[in-house]
């Protein structure tokens, strides 16, 4: 008879193959250290980034559940929970790294506390900083009110206002708490059998709060245990500043209130929460728009101010008849000049990173030519060509100087390059150091590798000019070589060692940390608790998402939509879906749709919904394409994208322009 299972680990994955690989490697080591029978589940929610293939090839011991859609976090976890046979069950995010002793220490704690229904641990972000969501209080109406309206952030250690994250409790001591984090949620199987599984009304957020509350109502206790630590990158989480996060997270609070609080009070609470949601969503939109518009508005102000100075100087010194320009020059003509220059500079790539002076010059030159050409047809708006040329010269100077000044304030360099090259050191053996160099080079990372640091004494095997010292000298090495980033090699250092170093060094001047997991081609890290994880990888470059191609694609969409609308009385008769043809033209013109794009493959970034797919041109009624084939065709389309590709697909699939996207 097989031994009874001690632990069932459940990880739900959706398109974060690079994080999942590192998480499973850390789980494997923690299982070995536990020394008791464990089963590990990975529930994949229809990922298209190779996650399934990676798990099959690298982790054959894992029980893999492949979903053909994305049913959400709760449903996916419940799929594995119904099959779990362990005495304890751990819900673990894929963007985490657990220490080697984590499972052993947590299971021992649960063994020693039979009244414990759930357990959370000390969570750190990718920079080694404590994550306050490691311990949380119940979001009662007042606690939620303080959280949403910012009082919890203003007074984090207050016993009244700081109850959401229990800021008044020391993160270094064990505490009985009310709410566990879904990123690491260890529970007793007997308790789950009593109170039930995750509530599937929650799609992404709130399910951990709901289950934690039901555990305490069932007579069990939840604990925060700082005796072990994990890294939580938040690589798969919605960004905290996004509008989507605001709506999903706070509406989860509404669901919780309606379910667990008195119905009469829940109505009032729901109204207040929804009011706060719209306020927070509005603030998030305003913040994002302001951040995106600020450089453009600053450039526009500089151009307009410069044109006013040039106009005044020209009136006083270089005109045959010294009379002021008409009012409409500064009120209408100059704003148009500025708009054309900035729009032309945008399409030339002046706002792409890294900044290139050639893009600025090209954009302003094209804009100046366009202004000059169109003004020739409008006698009333034809002003001095010399002033226009001087304005173009000022536009180039202003755009370049503004960027140089911004870089000086941020990086203390007048270079137009957005960010100076990083100084990087590798903490690991000489062999792994060479592998890191190879990955950085082939991923085109703008970094200067200063050298490598041996993980222990007496292990140096690299040339003297590459070896910086040993890990015990890390403080001095960071200071002497002015390092910006450390890359830890997972083959040479344990997760506990890496986490310990991150915690010890986090008071240094800004140093970022990344990890190369053993045998991986991904170097993973995060710049802070509110930043999603990032990574360097030997990965395929998709031409479709390059800034220049994004602009060209949008310009093509607008042009095609205008031409189709003009020709609509004739063109509409050749459409299979006549009623949707005009609607799609207007949607594409408004930017809510694109004519050709990805309909079956998941994009690595948010993308406008597509009406046609690259797979449509190869579709045969006799033998329909499989989903996998469609995704592969779309990947090839994205990899080698050019605007001409869209033109060809539009011509070949012309009859389907009116279909619903």
Image (spheres, helix red, strand yellow):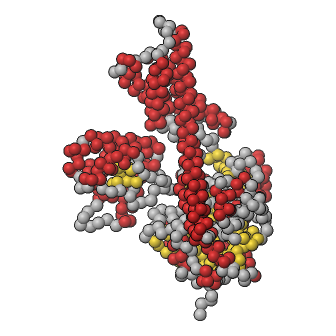
Image quadrant in which the C terminus is located? bottom left
Q: Residue at x 45, y 34 (%)?
A: 343
**Marker count (numbered):** 0
Q: Residue at x 75, y 61 (%)?
A: 160
Instruction: Farthest residue to the front: give it.
Output: 264
At x 72% / y 82%, what residue is drawn? 115
Query: Would residue 514 appear left or right of 310 to someone viewing this image?
Result: right
Q: Is residue 516 above or below residue 378?
A: below
Q: Position of residue 171 (x, y in %)?
A: 76, 64
Q: Is residue 10 above or below residue 491?
A: below
Residue sitting at 26 percent across and 63 percent down?
Answer: 620
Image coordinates of residue 174 in percent, x first then y, are 77, 71
Q: Residue furthest bottom?
A: 1
Q: Could you tell whether 152 is left or right of 638 in the image?
A: right
Residue 82 in the image: x percent, y percent? 54, 81
In the rendered structure, the answer to whether residue 194 lies left or right of residue 585 reads right
Q: Give the image location of residue 584, x and y in percent.
A: 33, 50
Pick the residue in front: 118 or 94: 118
Front-most of 171 and 528?
A: 171
Residue 426 position by quadrant: bottom right
- When the figure is inspected, residue 221 is found, relative to residue 351, above or below; the finding is below
Relative to 85, residue 507 above or below: above
| Residue located farthest toward the top when viewing the structure as drawn | 320
Q: Is residue 325 visible?
A: yes
Asked whether the viewer can see residue 632, the reply is no
Q: Quadrant of the N terminus?
A: bottom right
């Amino acid at each position: 008879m097989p031994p009874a299972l001690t632990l069932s680990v459940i990880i739900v994955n959706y398109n974060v193959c690079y994080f999942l690989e590192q998480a499973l490697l850390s789980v494997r080591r923690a299982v070995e250290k536990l020394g008791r029978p464990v089963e590990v589940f990975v529930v994949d929610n229809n990922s298209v980034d190779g996650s399934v293939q990676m798990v099959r090839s690298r982790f054959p011991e894992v029980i893999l559940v492949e979903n053909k859609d994305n049913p959400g976090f709760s449903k996916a976890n419940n799929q594995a929970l119904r099959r779990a046979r362990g005495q304890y069950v751990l819900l673990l995010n894929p963007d985490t790294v657990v220490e080697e002793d984590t499972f052993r220490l947590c299971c021992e704690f649960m063994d020693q506390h039979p009244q414990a229904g759930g357990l959370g641990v000390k969570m750190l972000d990718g920079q080694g900083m404590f994550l306050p969501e490691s311990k949380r209080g119940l979001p009662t109406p007042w606690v939620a009110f303080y959280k949403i309206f910012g009082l919890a952030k203003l007074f984090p250690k207050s016993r009244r206002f700081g109850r959401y994250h229990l800021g008044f409790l020391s993160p270094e001591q064990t505490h009985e708490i009310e709410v566990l984090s879904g990123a690491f949620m260890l529970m007793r199987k007997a308790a789950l059998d009593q109170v039930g599984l995750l509530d599937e009304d929650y799609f992404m957020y709130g399910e951990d709060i709901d289950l934690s509350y039901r555990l305490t109502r069932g007579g069990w206790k939840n604990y925060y245990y700082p005796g072990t630590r994990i890294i939580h990158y938040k690589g798969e989480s919605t960004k905290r500043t996004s509008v989507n996060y605001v709506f999903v997270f706070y509406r989860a609070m509404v669901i919780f209130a309606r379910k667990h609080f008195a119905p009469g009070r829940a109505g009032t609470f729901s109204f207040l929460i929804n009011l706060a949601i719209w306020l927070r969503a509005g603030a998030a939109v305003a913040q994002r728009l302001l951040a995106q518009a600020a450089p453009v508005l600053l450039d526009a102000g500089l151009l307009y101010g410069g044109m006013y100075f040039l106009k005044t100087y020209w009136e006083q010194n270089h005109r045959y008849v010294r009379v002021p320009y008409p009012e409409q020059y500064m009120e209408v003509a100059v704003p148009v000049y500025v708009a054309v220059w900035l729009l032309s500079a945008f399409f030339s790539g002046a706002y792409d990173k890294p900044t290139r002076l050639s893009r600025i010059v090209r954009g302003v030159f094209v804009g100046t030519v366009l202004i000059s050409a169109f003004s020739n047809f409008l006698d009333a708006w034809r002003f001095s060509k010399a002033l226009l040329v001087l304005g173009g010269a000022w536009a180039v100077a202003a755009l370049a100087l503004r960027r140089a000044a911004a870089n000086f304030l941020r990086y203390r360099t007048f270079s137009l390059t957005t960010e100076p090259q990083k100084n990087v050191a590798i903490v690991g053996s000489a062999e792994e150091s060479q592998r890191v160099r190879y990955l950085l080079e082939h991923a085109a990372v703008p970094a200067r590798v200063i050298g490598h640091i041996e993980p222990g004494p007496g292990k140096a095997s690299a040339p003297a000019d590459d070896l910086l010292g040993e890990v015990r000298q890390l403080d001095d090495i960071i200071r002497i070589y002015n390092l910006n980033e450390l890359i830890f090699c997972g083959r040479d250092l344990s997760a506990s060692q890496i986490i310990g170093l991150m915690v010890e060094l986090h008071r240094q001047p800004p140093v970022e940390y990344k990890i190369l997991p053993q045998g991986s081609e991904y170097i993973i890290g995060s710049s802070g608790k509110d930043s999603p994880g990032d990574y360097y990888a030997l990965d395929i470059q998709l031409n479709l998402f390059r800034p220049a191609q994004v602009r060209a694609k949008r310009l093509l969409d607008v042009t095609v939509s205008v031409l189709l609308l003009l020709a609509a009385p004739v063109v509409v008769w050749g459409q299979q879906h006549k009623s949707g043809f005009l609607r799609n033209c207007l949607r594409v013109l408004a930017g809510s749709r694109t004519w050709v794009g990805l309909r079956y493959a998941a994009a690595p970034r948010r993308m406008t919904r597509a009406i046609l797919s690259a797979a449509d041109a190869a579709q045969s009624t006799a033998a329909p394409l499989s989903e996998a084939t469609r995704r592969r065709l779309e990947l090839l389309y994205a990899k080698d994208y050019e605007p001409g590709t869209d033109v060809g697909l539009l011509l070949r699939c012309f009859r389907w322009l009116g279909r619903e996207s």
